[in-house]
Image (tube, grey):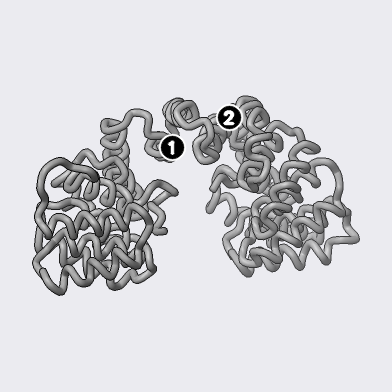
């Protein structure tokens, strides 16, 4: 079965229903032509999942009547169900040429082009189909999803709002509108849209996770935690659910419950590197340095190109004390190999330069860091210390003033160690 974008029913299913239910209703009164009977039989085979019979009949039909647009559409549908995607696309395109007034082959072809990652052609077919039938809910939604993939957010939002005009209870569209609101930092709208999605589709994991993510992004971590904990029996087998619950717990500094949630996420999906990383971060929060070291190494093994994981491994070694400096240095060098502009890695190198008495080197590194990331206050704090050691009092006091201003603005530390994806 060809799935629709974002887990929704594929347009092919909608086209099938429309074709068999509207054009040739089963049990219709009155005489039918032989041709209508043939097409109705093909439609019935498709409805009954008799795809090989439908394919054979549709092929015979288009051989005998090569200008029959509906027969080509049915041929495409049957081909999709049997995995013959190239033949299906050719059939839909042939149907479009023969009858450009029928929106169904446009939507079906669009889905196939999207699955091939040919987004431009997919968008074109959706646009042309929607110009004929603007009331197709799934097509409007899928069109919006493709626009998002192309980075055309404003147009995507319009498509999702048109989806809601067709069906105000469409939870998928409300989830996407919530995510778009988050992208522009409109947290109130994000929470509102996601809450409605969860109300309209209480059994949807995606809708409930979207609400939790909106709460977390709005710094309403307790609400996110309570919302997810109430749903734990329903979604206990979902790694994404435990991962998101763990984030809410972690941000609320409930490290032991977060450890349990992230462990469950990792058990359900061992390749989920962010869950592995956050499990290690939560263990670090509990003071379990051995567990944290093991966890960060596990995250690195899954994703060796992620400098953040190596930075946190270096933090573990820093916590362990000066005797682990060689290990911390090795981890930091890997960070800077992967990302030479990493601010924490350079700050750490500057710290060691200061400890070794190489104040000019420390000064150079720290000045580069604060130039690249003016809001990274740990570098400014250390730079103030270095300036004092170098008897550059005015420069030191200037750094201290900036740090106080950053603290007042709430920008007094590195970025939070989690990502909602």
Q: Sort mark 1 into few (<14), some (14-19) or many (20+) by Cα contacts within 10 Å.
A: many
Q: Sort mark 2 into few (<14), some (14-19) or many (20+) by Cα contacts within 10 Å.
A: some
As drawn, is 227 to the left or to the right of 97? right
Instruction: Using the numbered discs, state the Cα–Cα distance from disc 2 to disc 1 in whole angstroms.
Output: 19 Å
Specify the farthest residue to the right.
323
The relative height of residue 184 versus residue 266 in the rendered view (above or below) is: above
Q: Quadrant of residue 255?
A: top right
- Quarter that holds the N terminus: bottom left
Q: Determine whether label 2 and label 1 are within 8 Å by CB.
A: no
Residue for badge 2: 219
For the point 61% across and 46% down, the residue is 240
Q: Which numbered circle lies on residue 175?
A: 1
For the point 31% across and 44% down, the residue is 138
Residue 229: x, y in percent?
67, 30
Secondary structure beneath label 1: helix
**Along the line of sight, which residue is nearer the eye, 263 or 278?**
263
For the point 61% across and 25% down, the residue is 223
């Amino acid at each position: 079965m060809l799935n629709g974008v974002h887990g929704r029913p594929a347009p092919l299913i909608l086209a099938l229903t429309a074709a068999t239910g509207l054009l040739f209703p089963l049990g219709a009164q009155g005489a039918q032509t032989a041709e209508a009977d043939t097409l109705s039989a093909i439609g019935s085979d498709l409805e009954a999942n008799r795809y090989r019979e439908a394919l054979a009949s549709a092929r015979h039909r288009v051989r005998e009547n090569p200008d029959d647009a509906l027969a080509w559409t049915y041929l495409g549908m049957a081909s999709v169900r049997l995995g013959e995607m190239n033949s299906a696309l050719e059939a839909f395109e042939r149907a479009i040429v023969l009858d450009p007034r029928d929106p169904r082959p446009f939507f079906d072809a669009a889905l196939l082009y999207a699955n091939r990652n040919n987004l431009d052609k997919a968008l074109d077919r959706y646009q042309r189909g929607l110009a004929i039938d603007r009331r197709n809910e799934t097509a409007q939604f899928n069109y919006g999803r493709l626009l998002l993939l192309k980075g055309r957010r404003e147009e995507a939002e319009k498509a999702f709002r048109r989806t809601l005009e067709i069906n105000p209870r469409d939870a998928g569209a409300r989830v996407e509108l919530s995510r778009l609101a988050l992208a522009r930092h409109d947290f109130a709208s994000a929470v509102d849209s996601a809450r409605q999605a969860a109300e309209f589709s209480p059994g949807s994991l995606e809708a409930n996770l979207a609400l939790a993510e909106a709460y977390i992004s709005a710094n309403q971590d307790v609400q996110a935690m309570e919302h997810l904990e109430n749903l734990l029996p329903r979604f206990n087998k979902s790694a994404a659910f435990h991962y998101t619950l763990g984030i809410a717990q972690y941000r609320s500094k409930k490290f032991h419950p977060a450890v349990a949630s992230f462990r469950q996420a990792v058990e359900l999906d061992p390749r989920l590197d962010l869950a592995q990383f956050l499990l290690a971060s939560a263990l670090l929060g509990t003071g379990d340095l051995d567990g944290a070291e093991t966890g960060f190494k596990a995250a690195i093994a899954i994703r060796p190109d992620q400098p953040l994981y190596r930075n946190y491994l270096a933090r573990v070694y820093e916590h362990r004390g000066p005797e682990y400096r060689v290990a911390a240095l090795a981890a930091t060098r890997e960070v800077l190999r992967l990302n030479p502009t990493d601010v924490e890695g350079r700050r750490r190198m500057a710290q060691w330069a200061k400890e070794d008495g190489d104040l000019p080197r420390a000064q150079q590194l720290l000045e580069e860091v604060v130039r690249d990331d003016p809001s990274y206050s740990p570098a400014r704090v250390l730079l103030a210390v270095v300036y004092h050691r170098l008897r550059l009092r005015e420069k030191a006091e200037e750094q201290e003033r900036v740090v106080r201003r950053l603290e007042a603005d709430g920008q007094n530390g590195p970025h939070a160690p989690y990502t909602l994806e």
